[in-house]
């Protein structure tokens, strides 16, 4: 009873779950240039961390560790499109720069500028690692008015949950892979993925996946067929997020 009340009261989730964020960070770290890797290590050391995956969930952990900073940044974990055309329109979709697209641009610029205090750049690194992951979670850039599926109730293995959680965590966790195993498996997948592009384009891709690729199930029951169809899409998004995060860091931390 206590447990079910706790589950019912769980606040909406704010990103890929820990596994997804750690996988993205590990994929990116494996694709860094030596120069970017060295600077990443210096910045991480300022936060008592060694690997990108060590800081990948920090922006979510703020909910408990620094509620004031969390409140100021919680709208940066997603972008809500206002039209089914999935074309990013900042005045509507990112008012006051409060969305994942603008956040990636902002913190990437802070990270890239070596005139900024190292501690500020190290914090920006942690934000970038997290938000590049989030923006690739299709439901973090949705056009429906249901808080990215947080308000879309579904059933999974006989229990009530919501579609957002299925995508943040449930499908990935159902593999029972660790972040190390998962990232190794995905790195070994030879098939080409589209990388490059801008944060706005990554968000538009996510929105189109929600619209066109069966993310919203035909019934409220999430079954085996759903996972078989959608998990490969989630995994492709992890691979893209990892490659693009590496590209961004290689650019921001490359030669001046
Ligand atoms: N809250 C409102 N929209 C959201 C989204 N797309 N993802 C996560 N939380 C949200
Ligand atoms: Zn998040
Ligand atoms: Zn989420």
Image (cartoon, rainbow, N blue to C red):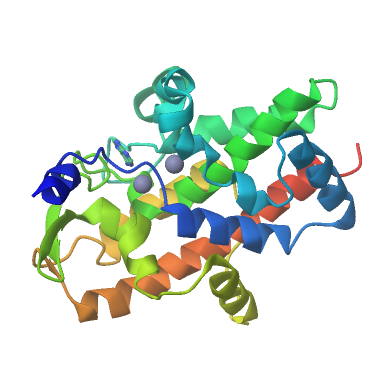
Image point (53%, 30%), residue name? 102
Image point (64%, 63%), residue name? 27
The quadrant of the image that shows the C terminus is top right
Q: 177 above or below 146?
A: below
In the rendered image, the residue lying farthest to the front is 2
Residue 75, image quadrant: top left
Q: Position of residue 96 (x, y in %)?
A: 44, 17
Q: Is residue 51 visible?
A: yes
Q: 144 above or below 17?
A: above
Q: Position of residue 62 (x, y in %)?
A: 47, 31
Number of numbered callouts drawn: 0
Image point (54%, 43%), residue name? 130
Residue 165, image quadrant: bottom left
Question: Would residue 224 be found to the left or right of residue 32 on screen?
Answer: left
Q: 179 above or below 81?
A: below
Question: Would residue 168 be found to the left or right of residue 217 on screen?
Answer: right
Q: 171 above or below 139?
A: below
Q: Position of residue 92 (x, y in %)?
A: 34, 26
Q: Position of residue 167 (x, y in %)?
A: 32, 59
């Amino acid at each position: 009873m206590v447990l079910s009340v706790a589950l019912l009261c769980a606040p909406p989730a704010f990103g890929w779950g820990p596994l997804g964020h750690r996988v993205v960070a590990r994929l990116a770290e494996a694709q860094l240039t030596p120069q970017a890797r060295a600077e990443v290590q210096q910045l991480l050391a300022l936060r008592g961390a060694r690997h990108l995956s060590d800081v990948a969930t920090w922006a979510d952990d703020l909910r408990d560790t620094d509620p004031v900073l969390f409140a100021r940044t919680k709208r940066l974990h997603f972008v809500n499109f206002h039209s089914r055309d999935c074309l990013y329109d900042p005045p509507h979709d990112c008012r006051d720069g409060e969305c994942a697209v603008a956040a990636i641009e902002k913190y990437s610029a802070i990270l890239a500028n070596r005139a900024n205090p190292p501690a500020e750049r190290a914090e920006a690194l942690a934000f970038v690692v997290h938000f590049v992951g989030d923006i690739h979670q299709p439901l973090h850039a949705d056009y429906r008015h249901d808080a990215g599926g947080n308000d879309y109730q579904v059933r999974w293995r006989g229990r009530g949950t919501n579609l957002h959680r299925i995508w943040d965590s449930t499908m990935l966790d159902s593999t029972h892979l660790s972040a190390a195993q998962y990232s190794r498996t995905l790195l070994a997948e030879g098939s080409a993925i589209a990388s490059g592009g801008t944060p706005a384009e990554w968000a538009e891709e996510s929105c189109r996946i929600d619209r066109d690729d069966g993310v919203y199930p035909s019934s409220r029951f999430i079954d085996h067929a759903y996972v078989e169809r959608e998990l490969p899409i989630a995994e492709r998004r992890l691979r893209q997020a990892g490659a693009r995060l590496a590209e961004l860091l290689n650019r921001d931390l490359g030669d001046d």
